[in-house]
Amino acid sequence: MTRKLILLLSFALFLPSCSPSTSLPTSEVLQTTPFQALSNTATSAPAATPSPTPNPYAALTIDALAARNYGDGQVVDLGVMSESTNFSRHLISYPSDGLTINGFLDLPFGDGLFPVIILLHGYVDPVGYQIETYSARYAASFASAGYLVIHPNYRNYAPSDFGPNEFRVGFAIDILNLIAEVNAQVGQPGLLQTANPDAIFLWGHSMGGGIALRVLTVGADVQGAVLYAAMSGDELRNFEWIRDVLSDGERGSEELTAPEEALQAISPINFYDRISVSVSIHHGDIDEVVPPAWSDELCAQLLALGKLVECFSYHNMPHTFYGSLDTLLIERSIEFFQRFTPAQ
């Protein structure tokens, strides 16, 4: 009796790769040729061809993030949380790769157009996280100065949905989707009707600064960014620090199992040449959470690449500022945003 034989074929994967270099190289994408369809006329089945193992890091690289699309919905107003003299605070949600992300939006009273600040908070233990975390006071300061402030709380921070977040790339995807949705929604009826589409900025503290740095290397449609005590663009350095210093071995170990070529392709430090907007860097000189030297190094690297960058060190300030120098940080941030907001 004749038996029909079926040969199962696999398709080649596209594997991004970046060679390590101290000269901040641009990564290259290596690709293999898909297997050609084969016919089988033999009377016995050949040995099975093993399927190639999927590359778990392929979608996490800077190249992969830069090649994909963002913005799959709208920012939704879920109601007023509170009102102050100068602005109203609204609970919001928006979609990001099939997840629902929550946060708040501070809308100044009066007629726009209002420049937009997307404010990225630093690491907070997700257990017991509240939407109005420590960084809400910075949002209030900017809103009182006439900025429309959006404060997302990322995936895996309740009440947002939970989703994949290796190397915190999921957080960056949430911000890239938000930026695309804001750009598409400005001028339309709703919370973003009075937003200035030509003046969208990032402001990120600590982990949020690291997220902002990744977003800048991917190439989001923003006009500038303030990085306040930001994590490094080198993921090997980040996760060794998280494992050994910040969590006593409880976090960071999984990321450090990645091969060197994957770490290179995922790390923003190798793609600073792609940053096309102005950057303002701020760090306290007694910060024990994120080393001040990391910001010093970032400043030197961006200057060497001819980028528009300004760098400030704050004497005797820890990871989160207080008092008069915290006020100075806010004033310098506002001055930076004003400088790069186009005249209306």
Image (cartoon, rainbow, N blue to C red):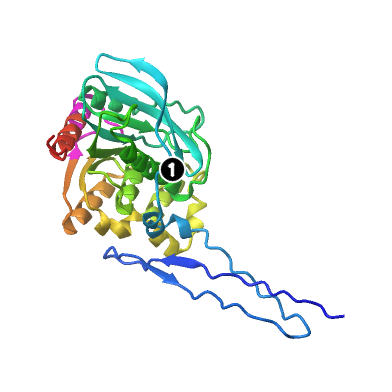
Residue with the most extreme right position: 1
Residue drawn at the location 29% of the way across and 24% of the way down: 107
- Quarter of the figure that contains the C terminus: top left
Residue 20 visible in the current orientation: yes
Horizontal relation, residue 195 to residue 214: left or right? left
Residue 57 image point, x, y percent: 48, 58
Give the extent of the magenta segment: 313-329
Q: Nearer the viewer, residue 136 or 223?
A: 223
Residue 58 image point, x, y percent: 47, 60
Residue 211 image point, x, y percent: 36, 44
Residue drawn at the location 31% of the way across and 25% of the way down: 106
Residue drawn at the location 50% of the way across and 51% of the way down: 253
Say which quarter of the image contains residue 9.
bottom right
Residue 120 image point, x, y percent: 34, 36
Horizontal relation, residue 81 to residue 281: left or right? right
Residue 205 visible in the current orientation: no
- Quarter of the figure that contains the N terminus: bottom right
Horizontal relation, residue 278 to residue 64: left or right? left
| The magenta stretch spans residue 325 | yes
Residue with the most extreme bottom position: 42
Which residue carries the number 1 mark? 72
| The magenta stretch spans residue 296 | no
